[in-house]
Amino acid sequence: MSREQKIGVLGGSFNPIHTGHMILAQSALERYELDRVLFVPCASPPHKDPARLAPGRVRMEMIEAVLESDPRFESSRVELDRGGTSYAVDTITQLTEAYPDAQLYFIIGDDSLPELHLWHRIYELLPLCTFVTFARHQQALVPPESLQLDPPWPERLLQNMTLARRIEISSSDIRYRIAEGMSIRYLVPDVIDMYIAEHNLYLGES
């Protein structure tokens, strides 16, 4: 009898995808013994200005270019195809239906953890997957009450906190460097550096 498949879900704008995303995905895969990680670019993020996003087709092409050589990672168009505001509860619901025999692990950063109580239909989302949180800095244990969620969710969420490798890379900084004519080498995979240059992306963002 085959074991239940374990699939990580890494969502975001990926505007653009960068080395930090790749390291986070690899860390999650190793730490939680996942079979693969899905990269899920959003259509329209609920808390960001969608006008600043590169088109979904462009962001997906960049993701696919990076993942092409690594079978552990896959891209998913679920949010782009659905369109509209990208809510995690809708995405995880669809992925649960698409992978009925898999256990889903939702990968987030510690900056998202204290905001979960504000997420759309959060109490529908929480039972659908296992949240795994990667913290950027060593810090004191987060008090469960600080998460502002009903029991037993604070305790369950805090059980899956892991100290991540400290990689200070952000998509916003990459876009800024491009607009200022600075190098993004080593901040993104080489294929993304070339893609951005060939398509003249992010030149007016400063």
Image (cartoon, helix red, strand yellow):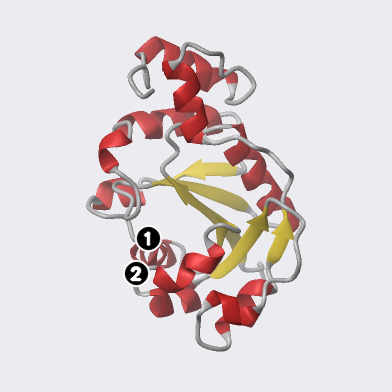
Q: Quadrant of the C terminus?
A: top left
* Quarter of the image that includes the N terminus: bottom right
Discs 1/2, front: 2
How many other residues sit within 10 Å of disc 1, few (<14), some (14-19) or many (≥20)? Answer: some
Specify few, some or many for label 2: CA neighbours under 10 Å numbering under 14, 14-19, or 20 or more. some
Q: Secondary structure at mark 1?
A: helix
| Residue identifier under label 1 | 91
| Residue 28 on image: x %, y % | 67, 53
Let me know if residue 77 appears in the view: yes
How far across and how far down the image is residue 103, in percent?
Answer: 56, 68
- Picture coordinates of residue 121, whole percent (x, y): 35, 74
- The amino acid at mark 2 is His
Identify residue for label 2.
120
Residue at the spot 58% in from the left edge and 76% down from the top edge:
146
Callout 2: SS: loop
Residue 46 higher or lower than 180, as above or below: below
Q: Is residue 109 above or below residue 132?
A: above
Give 156 or 110, whichever is nearer the viewer: 110
Give whichever of 196, 49 is nearer the camera: 49
> Residue 113's spot in the image, x, y percent?
55, 65
Residue kind at label 1, given as amino acid type: Thr
Label annotation for residue 29: none
Say if residue 32 shows up in the picture.
Answer: no
Is 144 on the left-hand or right-hand side of 179? right
Instruction: Determine whether 182 is above or below 32 in the image.
Output: above
Q: Earlier in the sequence, mark 1 or mark 2?
A: 1
Residue placed furthest toward the left: 84
Residue sitting at x 64%, y 54%: 35
